[in-house]
Amino acid sequence: MSRANLDKDPHEVAAMFDGVAGGYDRANSFMTFGFDRRWRTTTARALDASPGERVLDLAAGTGVSTAEYARGGAWCLAADFSLGMLRSGKHRGVPMVAADALHLPFADESFDAATITFGIRNFVDTKAALVEIARVVKPGGRLVICEVSTPPFPPIRFLYRRFILRAMTLVGRFSSTNPEAYSYLAESMAAWPDQRTLAQTIASAGWRSVEWMNLTFGVVAIHRAIKPPLDSEA
Ligand SMILES: C[S@@+](CC[C@H](N)C(=O)[O-])C[C@H]1O[C@@H](n2cnc3c(N)ncnc32)[C@H](O)[C@@H]1O
């Protein structure tokens, strides 16, 4: 079975997600004790997609979040480089496309907003992907990222690092077709930068008005940013 390393080779990452695609949604809900549902609805509120808007849900996996964002009437496209993950979400009926976040197959300024839920920490080059996403979003358009993060309160951070990540690996072993993949997911969570560092990377990729909001004691954070409008000063 395929397991990516923290150097995040895109072929290995895609093959690994192909391998877990069948049981992914179930395992995810199991490992997050059902909190993923609440995190997705809060992300949908932060995205605030309205009817007529075009939204790119990148690293969309099975399209579970894409379906949530489309509920309000926006046209939402699920893009992911794992065909296995996309196929597993076919029943959701959302439009899907195979695409690598670092080389998006879209024209400049094609979308009103772009969003990534639990995907960005798998990208081989975070800043390059954020620059590429800015290319396909219209000036003034939004970026919303929901990702695991660092609980700011030390006792919670201690518990999270010592126990929850280890528990996740164990739970993954029982609930997934590829336990090795779940060790990678836990390791990539532990290695992921904190809220402020991610905000700085987003800003360095050309996005403005970067802000974040902690969910569930900061175990997860939503970052939001705007692509500078055309008339703004650089
Ligand atoms: C943890 S899953 C999250 C899926 C979904 N967004 C969710 O919230 O359940 C991460 C997804 O990111 C995708 N991914 C990772 N790197 C990618 C890249 N460079 N381009 C496109 N998709 C990528 C993987 O294939 C996988 O489906």
Image (spheres, grey):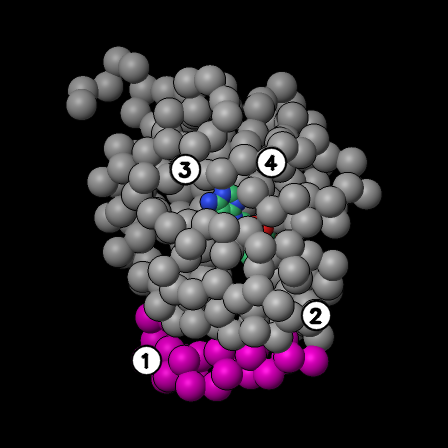
Q: CA distance from mark 4 to mark 2?
A: 23 Å
The structure residue drawn at horizontal position 29% and vertical position 15%, both measured from the top left corner, is 230
Task: Identify the mark at residue 102; answer none if there is no mark.
Answer: 3
Q: Nearer the viewer, residue 96 or 110?
A: 96
Image vertical order of residue 126 relative to residue 207, above or below: below
Q: Are marks 3 and 2 in contact (CB under 8 Å)?
A: no
Q: CA distance from mark 2 to mark 1?
A: 34 Å
Residue 180, x across and y down, in percent: 56, 74
Task: Identify the mark at residue 98; answer none if there is no mark.
Answer: 4
Mark 3 CB within 8 Å of ligand 1: yes
Which label's residue is closer to the chain start, 1 or 3? Answer: 3
Question: Is label 1 or label 4 in front?
Answer: 4
Q: CA distance from mark 1 to mark 4?
A: 40 Å
Q: Which residues are magenta?
A: 151-174
Task: Identify the mark at residue 154; answer none if there is no mark.
Answer: 1
Image-quadrant location for residue 227: top left
Give the quarter of the figure containing the N terminus: bottom right
The structure residue drawn at horizontal position 54% and vertical position 35%, both measured from the top left corner, is 99
Regarding residue 87, the answer to whether it shows in the image is: yes
